[in-house]
Amino acid sequence: MPEKPITALIEKIAKECEEANAGKWTVAKIVKQLSGEEATGIKNLRKKALVLLQQLDPKAGAVYASFQRMQVRTSRQAIEGFDRGNIIKSLLKETDVTRGVAEKIGHEVEEKIKDLEISDISTALIREMVNVKLLEYGHENIRNQYARIGLPVFEVQKKILQMPYNDRAMMAEYNLLRVIPGKLARMHLANEIFIAELHDFSTKPIAVSFVPEVKETSRETAFSAVEKANVLEKFFSWRPNISALNAAISAKASKKTAKDAALLWARAAKAVFLRKKAVPSFNTVHLFEPAAFAKKDVEREAMAVAANALLGEKENNVFETAVAIDSKFRLKLLHSVQPKTVLNCRNEEWRLLNGIATEKDGICSFFGLNASAIAFEHEGNESAFFESLQEKAGAIAMLDELKRKELGQREYLKKHGIEAEEFCSVLALDSLLEAGKAAIGAEKESEAISFGEKTLEHLAKALPKTFVIAELRNSTALNRFSLQNRKNFRAEAGKIEEEKQLRKSSSICKNYCFAAKAESKKELNELLESNVRVIEYGEKQA
């Protein structure tokens, strides 16, 4: 294969230096220096570019050096260094091949990857290359043992136009290969950001909340709600949430009828939704008349009775039951049960979608942002921190726009009345105050809170208005970020509890969705007054 003209090679290297965050002046100096070199091939030019970059901009040089090391995208949605030993191990584990042949093939595949200079290597691609080598050496039976069974990209595209395709591994690979641009995919794989439910990226919105339709009888309303939740579950990544169920089954109902219907619903839901998910879905009961029932004949006493019945059904209830209130006095309507989660609708009627309070009926996209990593990387440099923060937020906005475009092509969503373009999206931070402390070395709590407010302002400017900014409670994302930060920055692992500090800022309470904890009625009332959206209530027993 003839070598490309040196001008084209230098242009390619210049682009790579830019992607390594080298400044324009630095890139220009490298281009000038390389232009005087003879056409010795891109490998040698890259080596010389690396030496120059390490002298001019050590940080960018370190990034560029990492580009030159062969890396593999694994099925665990992670990037790891290439090791031909893994090829040998998998061949010996999965097939009857001899060690000598396995080692020979592992070596030849490694050399081929180096020769091809493949920028995006996946375990699936490596397996394909190994299978070709097995066939070249006449080991067809071994190739059949090692072959990967799956569908071509074209066939997957055809399938997802009709219905969501639920092979998680295959759809994650498809989205990384066909839908998400490489640069954005690498941010997820490098744990700079987190794309929730990656396998559903091009086929399903994340979450939905619906108000049950009032039927002729309370029993019919209860069964209808279970049926609708069961249908919607097929088209969302997380199990559907139900809003104002107690109000729906109390329309034109007596207190006894409403209670019976509430208990019937809990048993029916348990029969249908046998499995639990990592992210809980919520059945939000209202202790005030929600807007959706403003013009309907809802018996308020029956609403309270139904709410008490639903909260009391802890064993049969497969949904987390939250209580929405618009005044602290509404809690007096509860008798012997204490709500675990309170949705504060004192100033605005929120919907609770899997623990996140929003104005919308659904969540299109959910992303995590490793704010701690940005802080560790730019420690002591506030402007660099915010520049990187806005860059990551911009990438997330691009991903959200891409997902909305993909879902807009799914006729099965429209057929079931699911309009993802009307939904919000969520950007969740692994930390807000702790990241700020690391970024500016804040020692005082007031400094960290002030920096947190500033962080939210920057994110709000960088994101579309459809976004909700929230705390990250997704255990998968937190674990990925924690492991990455420990590896790169030797940061301590574990989730940081900062809600007691967050609640001290009215601005943060208004613009950031986090769960505050109340251990007494007095503390609960204070949080209601401060407009915290979600309150985890656990009153200490005497």
Image: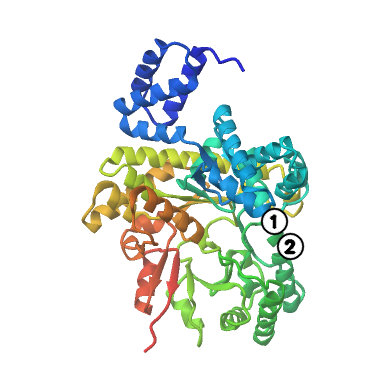
Q: Which residue is mark 1?
A: 235
Task: Name the amino acid, label 2.
Answer: Val
In the image, 319 versus 83, the foreground residue is 83
Q: Residues within 10 Å of mark 2 (few under 14, many from 20)?
A: few
Badge 1 marks a residue whose secondary structure is helix
Q: Which residue is mark 2?
A: 231
Between the C-alphas of marks 1 and 2, the distance is: 8 Å
| 92 in relation to 253, above or below | above
In the drawing, does residue 428 fall left or right of residue 160?
left
- Depth check: give the residue in front, 460 or 398: 398
Q: Residue lying furthest left in this view?
A: 443
Residue 370 lies left or right of residue 172; in this view the side is: left
Residue 270 appears in view: yes
Q: Which residue, as the protein is rendered here, is positioned at the far bottom?
A: 542
Q: Where in the figure is residue 288, as x and y percent of width and height?
A: 54, 72
Whole-percent x, y for residue 301 in the image: 59, 82
The image quadrant that residue 208 belongs to is bottom right
Q: Tell me the residue at 32%/47% (across/down).
A: 376
Please state which of residues 87 and 304 is positioned toward the viewer in this rendering: 87
Q: Type of residue at label 1?
A: Phe
Residue 268 drawn at (x, y percent): 71, 77
The quadrant in which residue 306 appears is: bottom right
| Residues tagged 1 and 2 counted as in contact (Cβ below 8 A) | yes
